[in-house]
Image (cartoon, rainbow, N blue to C red):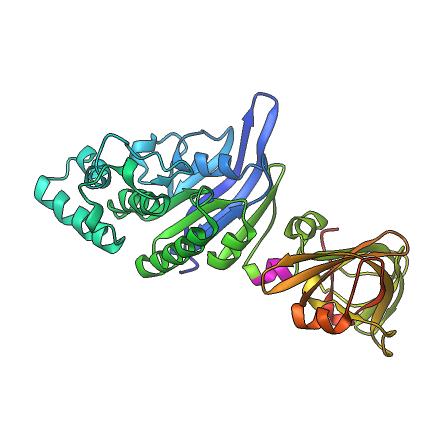
Amino acid sequence: MTDQALVVFDGVVKQFGGFVAVERMDLDIRKGEFLAIMGSSGCGKTTTLRMLAGLEAPSQGEIRLAGKRINDLPTWQRDTPMVWQSLALFPFLTVRENVEFSLRMRGVDKADRRRRVGTWLERMQITEFADRNVAHLSGGQRQRVALARSLVTEPEILLLDEPLSALDAHLKVRMQTVLSNLQKELGITFVYVTHSQSEAFSMADRVVIMSRGRVEQIGNPQEIYRAPRTRFVAEFLGSSNIFAGQVSAVTGDTVRIASAAGEFHVVRNPAKPLAKGDKATFVVSDDRVHLANQPPSAGLNGLQAVVVGEEFVGATAVVHLEAADGTEIKAQKSHDELEQLNLSPGAKVWVTWRADAGHILPGA
């Protein structure tokens, strides 16, 4: 991946009648990067992808691919193939014929078609299915056919619209590895739209979070997870404990924020200068929260909460708690830790965290 922009959205707006689907997007997509776009339904992520593919035209602004304005360029002249959620394979053709189709449409001679198709069938490990009808393949195998069909033309960029959503959980994990390794090996720019946080964070170099047609935050997965910019992003991640209140003191590198759940120390955020009396919101990730049967030692933030229940999430569990004021709190813990605490619904427990575990939202 380089810092060179392959795609530029410059002030792009998309309207459908009076509805604004994408609201003034300024976005650079770097050459060779794996970019994931995510957000809830109706946020504009698929519309953004469709504008890049040429399936929708921007209402305002400009989209440039490799420095060339492509607003009015027909889909078939863009070289921006897309892997659809439905895969959109031709059910009446064999695997080989599906992969060969785009080369045939481009007028590639038969010998070159056979060579290139053979290379991609082998690369996607589906050579043995070459002469089989795609309707007789498993979901994972059809996924590989769709990828081979899109990549056989060796494009600079590949667009993927929730391509794994129809797969079983174990197949999703396998295909995530295939996609990630393939992108790194080829150095092709991938633009990947998904609802799934685990998919985006496990594969992407950068993630774009969208809400109501606007870009809320762009950054690498670690930045977004640990340092969300806005309350929407923090809530969308689902792993953040959110406290809103007012600054009661500023001391050195920390601020004290009085919230309905209590007063807590938080390390200052350079992106959000605060003074006494300012409103402020901070978050603490559920994996940075500690649970104990005893009050916290000096220097730690703490409050008492009641256990509401536990949510099993594989190797860990999320404990759901409620503070006296009704604030909902989550704590992600290992099963060994929970066994030692011996928690049960209705039990009171101390929730603690360090000042540097909190993150003040700059966009709140």
Q: Does the magenta stretch include residue 263?
A: no
Q: Viewed as shown, does residue 236 lie left or right of 273?
A: left
Q: Give the range drawn in magenta.
A: 222-226
Q: Position of 164 compared to 103: left or right?
A: right
Q: Dividing the picture into quarters, in which one does residue 241 lie?
A: bottom right
Which residue sits at x=8%, y=44%? 111
**Left or right of 41 on screen, residue 192:** left
Q: Could one spot residue 343 in this view of the protein?
A: yes
- Viewer-side residue, 16 vs 142: 142
Q: Residue at x 55, y 59 (%)?
A: 221
Give the farthest residue toward the bottom.
Answer: 298
In the image, residue 322 above or below residue 353: above
Q: Position of residue 303 (x, y in %)?
A: 87, 65
Q: Which residue is drawn at 14% across and 43% down?
A: 113
Q: Please tell me whether residue 61 is drawn above or below residue 228 in the rendered image.
A: above
Q: Which residue lies furthest to the top in this view?
A: 17
For the N terminus, the image quarter is bottom left
Whether residue 207 is situated above or below residue 110 in the rendered picture: below
Question: Residue 270 placed where, x, y %?
Answer: 72, 65
Kindly tell me whether residue 256 is visible in this rendering: no
Of 37 and 72, nearer the camera is 37
Asked where in the image residue 25 lies, by quadrant, the reply is: top right
**Residue 140 horizontal/vertical position (percent):** 36, 47
Q: Where is residue 163 in the image (x, y as percent from the top left)?
A: 42, 43
Q: Would you say the magenta stretch is mainly helix, strand or loop?
A: helix
Total of numbered circles in the picture?
Answer: 0
Image quarter of residue 361: bottom right
